[in-house]
Image (cartoon, grey):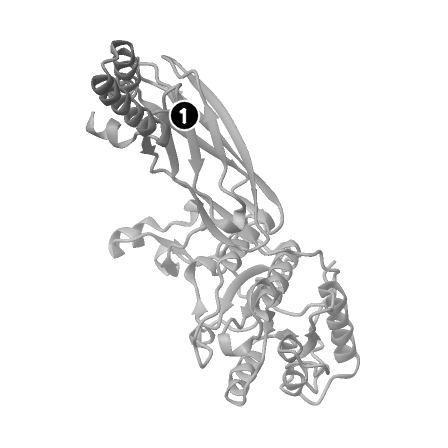
Amino acid sequence: MREALSGLTVRGRAFLAAGVTAIVCAVLLGQDALTRVGVLVLALPLVTAYVLGRSRYRLALVRTLAPQIVSAGQPARLNLTLTNEGKTPSGALLLEDHVPYVLGTRPRFVLDGIGQGWRRHASYQVRSDVRGKFEIGPMSVRVSDPFGLVELGRAFHTTVSLTVTPRTVPLSQIPLGGAWTGSGDNRPRAFATGSAEDVTVREYRRGDELRRVHWRSSARMGELMVRREEQPWQSRATLFLDNRVRAHRGQGIASSLEAAVSAAASIAVHLSQRGFMVRFVTAAGEDPNNAWHYRDADLNTAPLLEALAVVQAIQMPRIDTSWLAEASQGGLIVAVVGGIEDHDLAVFRRMHHHAAASMAVAVDVDAWGGATRRTGGASTTLAQQGWRAVGLGPRDRLETVWQELGRTSRSRRAGGSAGDPAGRSGEVVVG
């Protein structure tokens, strides 16, 4: 009852005040009829609060979000199913779902006629132009009587996650280098010889197939271990994104970092569709969840886009190069970078020598910083280090820049360069 009285609305409090005033005036004026009216007006919100406070309704909420992963600018629909599992009817329901402001305004619903076995469906649409991972919920519920005199607050604690990935554009096929499987099928093959004792193993990573689990080693190590069954000529690509604050300019969705993330997402999808096993590396190093895995294009693309959806600018003066210390070298490196400082040159030289082929899309951060004259960004600097690099400005189309990078690759194959005198004759064009 105390909770119900604290839930009196402005109308309910007005009824209480009017009832008390009417009774006092009736006593002072000696009007018995006015006393009866005052008692009726005073009793109405009190009786309503008592009945609503004694109601034993049990509301259940089921959320369904489809799809749970969308590209920036694409809508997603949230379906709600509410049921009353109690036996006591209640008044109207005022529903409000907590939605991050980037997904739109908070949806509100009014549902009435709540009785035993009551069930209602509602849905609303959310859309974001900003990438990221957002929590939708919890749902707040306010139960009201038919007269609107009392409102009681309730809340569901469940939430649902929506992942908004960067926008991607289809890219044309250009010459790519790297390490390729001898059979050309880009699939793992077991070793032809050697006993089970000779199989090398590593820790289990999300996405590894369970059939590759080496149970004897897992029992000995106390954690899941999988066989290293890949051949050294498997086609691999490393996608590097420089997400340091000092390497980019601008704020929000119009910043150079957002352009770099969108470019990296398009390149990740393109490489996966062309049969590459792609791992994603940032300036902070390699995330084990985004390492190489044997998966088809769709399964390989989803974790990459999810990782790119939550990439944020980091305060790091230098690039972490621990991922370059692994024993197996080669493959393709595609870098999406911003501004490059002098102390970064050694890192990019090391990346270039580490890979069989190195390509870069250099965001022209000076143009994002307000410069009226195009400088080309870091593409010239990377080209001097042996990279095949092109610049990306605020008004440039990524498809056009990617094709320009392909023409740069063809010219390198034809005549070589000062940074790569051999001309990388081992390249192939994959259709």
Is 187 drawn above or below residue 362 in the view shown?
above
The answer to whether residue 316 of the structure is visible from this angle is: yes
Disc 1: CA contacts within 10 A as few (<14), some (14-19) or many (>=20): many
Q: Quadrant of the N terminus?
A: top left
**Residue 3: where, in percent of width, then height?**
23, 30
Quadrant assignment, res 287: bottom left
Residue at the spot 48% in from the left edge and 58% down from the top edge: 310
What quarter of the picture does the C terminus occupy? bottom right
Query: Is any atom of residue 54 visible in this view?
Result: no
Residue for point 71% across, 56% down: 170
Q: In the rendered view, tell whether residue 146 sits above or below residue 429.
A: above
Which residue is pictured at 36% across the width and 26% down the height?
143
Q: Nearer the viewer, residue 262 or 267?
A: 262
The amino acid beneath tag 1 is Leu
Q: Nearer the viewer, residue 68 or 113?
A: 113
Instruction: Give the residue number, with chain letter if any, for mark 1.
Output: 93
